[in-house]
Image (cartoon, rainbow, N blue to C red):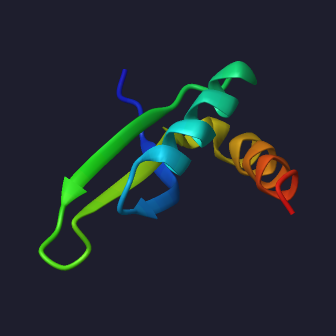
Amino acid sequence: MWIKWVTIHESYGLPRVAQECRRYLERQGIRVRLFSKQTKRAGHIYMLQVPSDQEEQARNWLREFKSSFQ
């Protein structure tokens, strides 16, 4: 069975933020993969991807994670 992955977060430069978001979501029981690609202008783009069936739940957890820093 194929898994359709959906990007829910993108970071540019260093992977620190994407790694923290990934660890947080994994602790909440969400399957996560961190996909990166190199660009000519921004250096690297780090994309946090989750299965499409967990997208809504992951977005809610990610929103809560980001609001804890404000």
Farthest residue, direction bottom? 41
Which is more toward the observer, 67 or 53?
67
Q: Is residue 8 left or right of residue 37?
A: right
Please provide percent x and percent y for residue 28. 75, 24
Residue that appears at 79% across and 43% down: 61
Q: Is residue 69 left or right of residue 58?
A: right
Farthest residue, direction left? 40
Check the picture and name the quadrant holding the N terminus.
Answer: top left
Residue that appears at 85% across and 58% down: 67
In the image, residue 64 sits, relative to residue 29, either above or below, namely below
Q: Quadrant of residue 2?
A: top left
Q: Is residue 34 left or right of residue 9?
A: left
Residue that appears at 85% across and 49% down: 64
Which is more toward the observer, 58 or 15?
15
Please provide percent x and percent y for residue 29. 70, 20
In the image, residue 2 sits, relative to residue 65, either above or below, namely above
Please provide percent x and percent y for residue 16. 48, 45
Residue that appears at 77% across and 55% down: 66
| Count of number-bearing discs | 0
